[in-house]
Each structure stands twice: as structure tokens, then as C-alpha cells.
Image (cartoon, grey):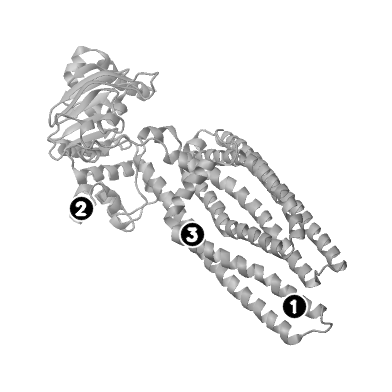
Amino acid sequence: MKNKGFDSSTLRRILRDLRHYRPALILSLLLAAATVAITLYTPFLTGKAIDLIVDEGKVNIPQVMLIAAQIGVCTVISAICQWVMNVINNRITYGMVRKLRRDAFEKLQRLPLSYLDSHSVGEIVSRMMTDVDQFTDGLLMGFSQFFTGILTIFGTLIIMLVIRPGIALVVILVTPLSLFVASFISKRTYSMFKKQSETRAEQTAMIDEYITNHKVVVAFGREDEAEEEFNEINERLGKCSLRATFFSSLTNPCTRFVNNLVYAGVALTGALMVIGGQGFSVGQLSVFLSYANQYTKPFNEISGVLTELQNALACAARLFEMMDEPEIVPDKSDARVLDSVDGNVDLENVAFSYTPEQDLIRDLNLSVKPGQRIAIVGPTGCGKTTVINLLMRFYDVKAGEIRVEGTDVRNVTRDSLRASWGMVLQDTWLRAATVRENIAMSRPDATEEEIVAAAKAAHIHSFIKRLPQGYDTVLGENGGTLSQGEKQLLCIARVMLALPPMLILDEATSSIDTRMELKIQNSFAQMMQGRTSFIVAHRLSTIESADVILVMKDGKIIEQGDHATLLSQKGFYHHLYFSQFSGAVTASDK
């Protein structure tokens, strides 16, 4: 752990963000001061009433009732000030939390794909949701109790020094011990709360992973192993939480013990002065005891605030870690917009690797003319999908360059580059929205007729009409109960609606039955007409009509040509092609 104690850098960052709420903070401080002033004035009135009863030998009812009325007015005004202050503090806190979540989500859009590939979804969600909620609790408690606590301590101390410096000296001498105890414990709880937050994120990631892939877990009978893994993390989280809570909970009883010493010291000293006839009345003693109680009470509250702040700062630090991650290198200031794309794509001496110690793509060269269909085949891990990531500029090449219409893609805006491509991936994604909205994601301004035409072209229109509300049917998360094939057809309709000048089909029909695949292939053939298309496929029968087939192995193109040419060469492609059919024959014979 980098930070063992109070994380001052995170606190300074939070305070910088709070500058946006300066007027509200000032008003909150003024209301806190008013509340404290009224609260400190009330014991003075009480002491005065006690002296009226004790000193004169008979109760002066009119005077006591007047004082009681004053106490009532003070109580009402104090309650109103506290209510308004709490409303303001809530607005500040939740306004800041809203800003943090908005900034974090915007940051997420600017993070490179490498960050998302190296961090689990559950961990990111935990940082943006759970950690922010924990931060909210600590910040709200800080606003609600910290201001009034500090003002109460200084206010009571000043009044006691003015009235009776001798008794106030007892308070001053014992106070540092309370501060030392609170500081000693709080410095040691930060690392514990940070560990708790990290373990909680690990648990969230594990739950997210197993819920998302529950069918696979059940299919392979891994329920017991999943439960064991969850119990292990849950046990560690329980220990972390108990340890952090145990040490942080020591603060309140320890400071309370010290504060009781203060109260006892004031009571003993004041009582001796009353008995000794040193001009110290019973009413004044009650005032001092009330002030001593008010003086010590904030220490207990502030110790609780410090405990929550440790947790809040630990959670804020994790969120700030994500927000400080290096962003995608922004588009160059002179980057041009691709506004007229015919489909010329060139890859020259392209090299790329996800990790420095392991090469993936080396010296990749390719020249694609407008309207050509380029199929990419090869064994798993050969770099097929990586080529797609580079074409879309999800990653930048380490060496060489990729050009579209003769311009290096690093010299054009990402938005215009990606708008020039239409993608249908093996992994589908549908929003929790209507069917119409999911199809129109590629073109939000599309008309109803265009959406229906795209659905018909993707052979999904008749299925949509059978849904309860047709195109207005709201789909659940990631497609809800739709089959994988139905979800993929909707994604195909989405691309057919946009019809960009270039296409990428990455296992686009992998989840569709053979009969439907033939229909989709015909639709693809129409869609690809005149458009440069890159097709990644494992089923080689689907790419026989490609103009150029690239055979990749270990990050390099080892063979290149059309289907007939590659078969005639009897090389690696020949082996791949016939191994699929021979495998099918063998399987059927069994």
C-alpha cells in the first residue's frame, strides 16, 4: 500500500472540487455558526433560571417563564438553522457525487481499450457505484457534524476561559490526550478501509462474472467451486471489514473516556469553588457542566466522522485512480475528417503486440482496392481479430502504418474513421430498449420505413412482428430472452440500416442456423456490393466467394489469393479447408 495513514492528496483533491460549491459552503458555515451560538446561549439561560430559583429562596415565576420562553425560541431557531444547513449539505454532497459519477463515466469513454481489457467489469462497476456510495456517506457525515463540532469546541472553550479561566485550564490540559487518541487510531485505519474497498471490488467482479456466465457454470457442474471461491472472498472481506471496524470503533470509547475525565474534573473543581464561597453560584456550575458536556461531545462525533472519512477517502482514492489513468491519445489538432471514402485500405509493415515481451503481428502488408472482399482465416490466436482492432483504431500500431484513402489513420479523426466502417461481431450487444431503438442505434435519424427495410434485409422482420409489441417491444438486458441467433440478426439489421462504405464481419453468422445463414449470406452479398469488406470466419465455406483470402499464422500472412488459387497450392489453406469437411464426415459416420 502506498498510503498508510490519512490520505492528504485525496483530501486536497476533494477540497478543490468543493470550490464549485463555495457560496453554499459559506452559507452552511454561517448556519453552523448560528446553530452553535444559539446552542451555547441556551445553557447560560438555564443557569440564570437556576440561580433565580436557588438564590432568592422562592421561585420567581414570571422571570423563569420569560427565560423558558427564550429557551423555546432559541430551540426553534436552532432547529430551523440545522434543517436548512442539512438541506444545503445534502445538496453539496449529492451534487458532488453526481459530478464524480458523471466525470467517471465520461472518463470511461476516453479510456483505451487496453484498460477495459485488463480490468474486470465488476471492479469498474464497484469503483463507480459502491465506492462512490461509501464516499457519499463519509462526506455527508463530515458536512453534518464536522463544522458544528469544531465551532462548538472553540466556542465553549472561549466562553469557559472568559467566565472561569481556572476551570477552563482543566479542560485545556486534558484535551490533547483526546486528540492524540483519535489521531493515533485514525491514522492506522486508512489502509484497513482501503483493503476492505479492494476486496469488496474483487467480490463484485466475481459475482458479475458468475452471474453473466451462469449457464456455463451450471453446464460444467462448477456450482460448488463457484461457491467455494465466493466463500473465500467473502471470508476475506468479512475479516477486512471486522478489522477495520474494530480498530475504528476504538476511537469513540477511548475519546469518550478521556472526555468523561474532563467532565469529572470540571464538576469537582466547580463544586469545590461553590462550597468555598468563591463567588461561583450553583447556576454557574450547571452552566459550566453543560459547556463541558457540549465541549466533549463533538470529540466523540468528530472521532466517528474521522472513521467515516478514512473509509470515504479510501473509496475516493480508488475512484481517482481510475480517473487518473492515461486516456486515449487524442486526435491530432490537424486531423482530417474522412468525408469521402471509396474503400482504399493499405497496411504497410504493420507490427503490433499487446505486451512488449510477446510479438503478435509482424511485417503485415496488404493493399485493398474499393469493393474488394477480404477474408481473413487462420488458427485461433493468429491475429485475425487484432487486425480488425487495428483497422478500427481500437489500438494503434506499434510500427508501420494503416492508410485509408492514402491517409494514415492516425492522422484522421476517430469518429470519422469508425463511421466509415460497419461492424457485425460474433459477440452481440443489445440495449435494454425497444427493438426499434436497438436497430436505429447506427442511425438515430432513420425513418420507420428505413428501419423496417433493414430488418427485412436481415430476415428478422417477420420475427419482430410476432413479438408482443412488434418494433416497440422492450428488450431486456443484452437482448433478454432472445436467442443468440436472433440477437445477431438484430445486430446485422443495425449495420444494414447504416450501410457505411466499408464493412467488417467478424464471425457474423456464427450463431445462425444453416438455412438462415444462406439467406443472410445473400443479404451480405447485396450489402457488400461496391463496399470494401473484411470478413473473419472459421467456417471456410462462407468465404469461398471472397476476392482475396488472407491466411494468417503467428501474426503473419503466410498465404494469399482467391479460394481456387489457394486450394491449388495445397498449402496451409488447403489443409484447413479439407480438415473441416473431413471432420464433418467423420462426425456423421460416428
The disc at residue 147 is none
Q: Which residue is mark 2?
A: 446
Badge 2 amino acid: Ala
Tell me where residue 20 sits by quadrant.
Answer: bottom left
**Regarding mark 3 in the picture, which secondary structure is present there?**
helix
Give the image location of residue 91, x and y in percent: 47, 61
Kindly report which numbered mark, 1 or 3, lies closer to the viewer in this rendering: 1
Q: Which residue is mark 3?
A: 25
Give the image location of residue 572, x and y in percent: 27, 15
Q: Is residue 172 above or below residue 236?
A: below
**Regarding mark 1 in the picture, which secondary structure is present there?**
helix
The disc at residue 49 is 1
Give the image location of residue 17, x and y in percent: 44, 50
Badge 1 amino acid: Ala
For disc 3, the neighbor class at 10 Å (few under 14, some 14 to 19, many from 20) is: some
Q: CA distance from mark 1 to mark 3?
A: 36 Å
Badge 3 amino acid: Leu
